[in-house]
Amino acid sequence: MKKIVTLALVTTLVMTTGFSTAFADSWKHQGGYKLPPGLAKKGFVPPGIAKKFSDINDYKWAKDAIEKMVEEGVIKGVGDGMFAPKQAVTKLEAIVMALRVMGEEEEAVEYGLRIRSGERSLRIKDHLQEWAYGYVALAEEKGILDEADILYFKLNEPAKRHEVAKYIVRALGYEDEAQDRMDEELDFEDASFIPQGSVGYIYIADKEGIITGYEDGTFRPQNTVTRAEMAVMIDRLDDKFDDDDIDEDDLKEYEGTVENIDNGYDWIEIEVGRRDKKFDITKYTKIVFEDDVKGDIEDIEIGDEVEIKVNEDNEAVYIEVDRELYKEYEGRVEDIDNDYDWIEIEVGSRDKRFDITKDTEVVFEDDIKGDIEDIEIGDEIEIKVNDDNEALYIEVDREIYKEYEGTVENIDNGYDWIEIEVGRTDKRFDITNDTEVIFEDDIKGDIEDIEIGDEVEIRVNEDDEIEYIEVDRELESDIYEGFLIEVEDDEISVLVSRKIRSFDLDSDVEVEFKDKDGDLDDLMVGDEIKIIMDEENDEVEKIEVDRKYSSVGVNGKLINVYKNKRRIAIEEDDEIEIYDLESKVKVYINDRKADLSDLEKYDNLYLALDDDEVEEIRAYRIVILD
């Protein structure tokens, strides 16, 4: 099965950008279509004789893959002993490739017949040869092409690397996995140039070893995919699918301890029971360690416990090693190189030094990513090291942000720093524009609201800058800002910092709009207001409304809407009042246009009246997010 899938996939490369009319015509058969020459019986080009191309000598990194694929009849040259390694692969070729990976060749041809006969429609036919109709239609149906692709799909344009990654990953059925990885921080030097919508696809393509980065650490997402690059990708796919043409029932399984390994890694010897057995190693032998981590034969050590699967030719097809590929150590950081080239930790009674590379990942508590510079001498860490003694992963057993609790001793007049007593020591920390201050009940405050003597908990970054201050008391303020929830009797309810708070109203409370004074009856549910407290009696003495005064209106809770009679009933001051509706009454919910049918019972409403008829209804539904 593997050969059919893989070799069918790569026939894309036979279709160069300059697809000839003669070649396309050769597909025609009695008014319909048959597969391209050589694909009709087995789904791939028959094995050919390896050709020597005069233009691939400078492509050492791709030469073996090109010659291998040509020898297997997978890829053809362009004539005159040329391969054209620099020639770009088009989007259409990439789509055809993806469909063949899925094994949809026959269905694509069938779709083409139905489109040609008028039984099916195709949204994009412009500049599309008839042989390709079925592939494009099926690609849309299978999700390889989405709506955006259809709208902007230019078939004969060269396919970019990030686009090919998307097509291949979708074809392989990894769409959900790719979507889950859209927020990944890719390790490529040019990761910032990768389109956000392609991040997950590139992550999967790289992880699967299908489309990887360049030696300089870049991915070059906007580069077109060349025939040479495609040959390498196909060669990798060929290896990837090797397991598919092996019948598991034909494999023998053995478990035992590794006794010996050939210096040239041509064979491995394991002790099975009381006997030693030797098995051949090939380039197709798959090595897997714990957690499905792929390895190489060089990673296996004498003494390892392994499970090995062998074919009828005594070749090891699969070796599973019963340990992690990477060594792990736990200990205390003793020293760090000034240039961060190495780190030394105490493991047991011995110091061990490990190399740091640009790929070393550093993680603190709560999976917060950090840098090697954030690690301090004395930190307790867990380190994962490869066979080259390079630290791959360092987990630090502390938060990257330090936290302190104490009493405020001093605050800078310019609010540049705050000093708190921690234990018996005074510590000073910098305040920035980003410093967040929170009082009890999650009420946001300002640094000016903190007083000497307050008990606080602060979080500080590595630069001694305060990220967060939590004050252990209520915020005592003369002014509160928020959104009006309700006015009832002598009390007003306001949504302040995600919490509904109620305040007593002074009997002579003032209501001030942007353009004139008003009274409590002029307020609307949902109004953005500022309330000013009287310090002596702790009552609201003034309400400032962040809008202009509007026409006559009433507040209440919705009881019912009588559409046929064009009336509305609301509860107003504990009484039910009914108002007539204008024929073109406007309805808004949370300031968005809506319809009468969208209103719900007990909605907080404001009715704007004109000649005793309701001309506008505004409903406010307060949603408090934790």
Image: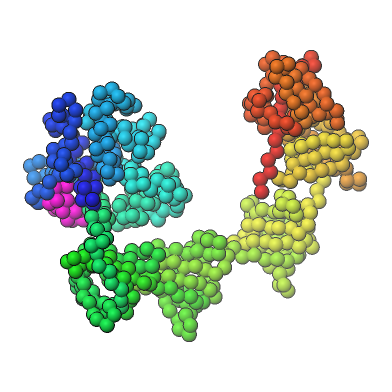
426 with respect to 218 (left or right):
right
**Looking at the rendering, which quadrant does residue 156 occupy?**
top left
Coordinates of residue 47 in the picture (x, y in percent): 12, 49
The answer to whether any part of residue 516 appears in the image is: no
Residue drawn at x 42%, y 77% as measured from the top left: 353
Coordinates of residue 524 in the picture (x, y in percent): 77, 30
Does the magenta-highlighted stretch encompass residue 65? Answer: yes
Closer to the camera in the image, 256 or 211: 256
Closer to the camera in the image, 546 or 395: 395
User: Is 193 rendered above or below residue 240?
Assistant: above
User: Is 144 rendered above or below residue 619?
Assistant: below
User: Is 69 rendered above or below residue 128?
Assistant: below
445 with respect to 304 (left or right):
right
Q: Which residues are magenta?
A: 54-74
Closer to the camera in the image, 9 or 128: 9
Residue drawn at x 33%, y 55% as measured from the top left: 208
Coordinates of residue 352 in the picture (x, y in percent): 43, 79
Residue drawn at x 17%, y 44% as measured from the top left: 42
Q: How is the image coloured?
A: rainbow
The mark total stands at 0
**Looking at the rendering, which quadrant does residue 523 occupy?**
top right
514 with respect to 93 (left or right):
right
Coordinates of residue 287 in the picture (x, y in percent): 30, 66
Residue extending farthest to the front is 249
Residue drawn at x 28%, y 22% as measured from the top left: 118
Residue extending farthest to the bottom is 349
User: Is 42 rendered above or below residue 155?
Assistant: below
Closer to the camera in the image, 506 or 295: 295
Does the magenta-highlighted stretch encompass residue 235? Answer: no
237 with respect to 508 (left or right):
left
**Looking at the rendering, which quadrant does residue 472 occupy?**
bottom right
The answer to whether any part of residue 151 appears in the image is: yes
